Image: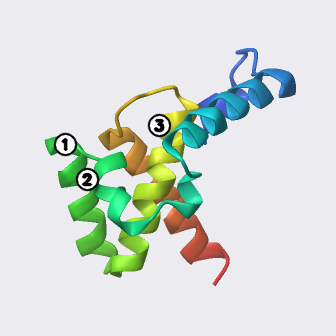
Amino acid sequence: MPYKELRGNEVSECSAEIRLRVDRARAVQQGRGFYNSRMPARQIRKQCALDESGERTLEMAVRRMSLSARAHDRILKVARTIADLGESGAVSAKHIAEAVQYRSLDRNYWS
């Protein structure tokens, strides 16, 4: 989270609002027949389709971080979840970038 956001005077989301957003995202996922974490490999390309910008972002991350095929798929699933939480029908470059950041944090601080 950027420092300015931490120090800003904006009112943040309350827990009840966050819970509603999570419930809506889970309902969308159930409508697909599975939660994103359990998305079958054959569904990843369909459910996590990317535009050109998203493809470039993901390709750059895969190359720079030397990601495996498994890590590639996990990033797509996390990006799909981020898009679901934002009530976005499509996975965009910003969703990919956020998912990659989470992956970077995981590798840097928990390994």
Q: Looking at the image, which is closer to me, 24 or 3? A: 24
Local crowd size for mark 2, using a 10 Å CA cut-off: few (<14), some (14–19), many (≥20): some
Residue positioned most to the left: 52
Residue 37, how many percent across, how many down? Answer: 58, 60
Mark 3 → mark 1, Cα distance in angstroms: 15 Å
At a point 34% along the width and 34% down the height, the residue shown is: 90
Task: Identify the element where label 2 is drawn.
Answer: helix
Of the residues under marks 2 and 3, which one precedes in the sequence?
2
Q: Nearer the viewer, mark 3 or mark 1?
A: 3
Q: Earlier in the sequence, mark 3 or mark 1?
A: 1
Q: Which residue is disc 2 drawn over?
A: 57
- Classify residue 90 as left or right of residue 86: left
* Residue sitting at x 37%, y 40%: 94
Q: Position of residue 83 (x, y in %)?
A: 47, 37
Q: Quadrant of the N terminus?
A: top right
Front-lying residue, 4 or 82: 82
Q: From the top left corner, tell me how far across and down residue 31 is, in percent.
A: 55, 37
- Establish if 50 lies above or below 41: above
Instruction: State which quarter of the image contains the C terminus.
Output: bottom right
- Name the foreground residue: 27 vs 83: 27
Residue 62, image quadrant: bottom left
Q: Are marks 2 and 3 in contact (CB under 8 Å)?
A: no
Element marked by disc 1: helix
Query: In the picture shown, does residue 98 fall above or below 42?
Result: above
Query: Taking 44 as reference, is 16 above or below it?
Result: above
Amino acid type of the residue that numbered disc 2 sits on in the rendered structure: Thr
In the displayed structure, does residue 73 sit left or right of residue 1? Answer: left
Question: What residue sits right under mark 3 in the picture?
Answer: 83
Residue type, label 1:
Ser
Q: Are marks 2 and 1 in contact (CB under 8 Å)?
A: yes
Q: Which residue is mark 1?
A: 53
**Residue neighbourhood size for the residue with mark 1, other residues' Cα within 10 Å, grouped as few (<14), some (14–19), many (≥20):** few
